[in-house]
Amino acid sequence: MKKLIGFAAIAVFCTNSLAEIPVKNNSIPFNKLPIEIKEVVQNHYIEACESIAEDEEMAIKNPKITFDKGFLVNVDFNNDGLKDYIIRSSEVTCEGAYSMFTGNSDGFIDIYFQNKAGKYDHVLNYWLGREGLELEKRKDGYRFISEYNDSYLTWDKSINKFISYYGPEKRKDILDINDENSTTSQTSTEKGEVLRQAFQ
């Protein structure tokens, strides 16, 4: 096991293994996260960044990964009285591969709803495009709203589905939980699928 130096925030995960690269965490402390969210951080972010050290074309031997403040958000997004987790890929940087988790866009958000058993279900993987969507609290819960136009993403409690609205095209999409279309957003299904596959 490599010794991690230079950072106070070192992530220990439920897999009983330390990250093999330096980890700087400015978000919610990882030791306070539920197991489902810890595993996502470990498997989809830390291990992906670690992998560039094995790439012969990359000059980075021991890349650093940094999680910024907005990486994890713990709010009641669907207004059911239970706090959910939202992960935002644009709030992660991997030294030597700075666009790894975003591509040429604002990246993705992944939403995990808490169920009545206290577990977390992955309900949405959503490509943000380049619309500048930011999380906003409202009377009926939360939604992502664009700072540039009328685009938004919200949860409609009356039908138990996500509503995606792309302002420039005045296009409204209804997204089922874990529906294939939930991996896309404003610009096109094809672009969203290409980016999603690139990060798997």
Image (cartoon, helix red, strand yellow):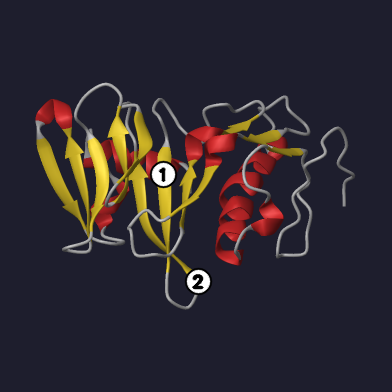
Q: Residue at x 87, y 52 (%)?
A: 1
- Mark 1 or 2 closer to N-term? 1
Q: Residue furthest bottom?
A: 117
- Is residue 121 depicted above or below 87 in this figure? below
Residue at (46% x, 32% y) in the render: 102
Quarter of image, res 58: top right
User: Is any atom of residue 185 visible in this view?
Assistant: no
Q: Along the line of sight, which residue is nearer the eye, 25 or 137? A: 137
Which class describes the residues within 10 Å of circle 1: few (<14), some (14-19), or many (20+)? some
* Residue 10, x across and y down, in percent: 78, 45
Q: Which residue is mark 1?
A: 109
Disc 1 secondary structure class = strand
Q: Please, what is the three-letter code of the amino acid marked with disc 2?
A: Lys
* Residue under numbered circle 2: 119
Does dot 2 land on a helix, a strand or a loop?
A: loop
Q: Between tags 1 and 2, which lies in front?
A: 2
Tell which residue pokes out farthest to the front in this image.
Answer: 139
Residue 186 position (above or below residue 73): above
Q: Amino acid at mark 1?
A: Ile
Cβ atoms under marks 1 and 2 closer than 8 Å: no
Out of 183 and 58, give the one closest to the viewer. 183
Q: Where is residue 98 drawn, in percent x and y?
A: 57, 26
Q: Nearer the viewer, residue 160 or 98?
A: 160
Residue 149 on image: x %, y %: 21, 24
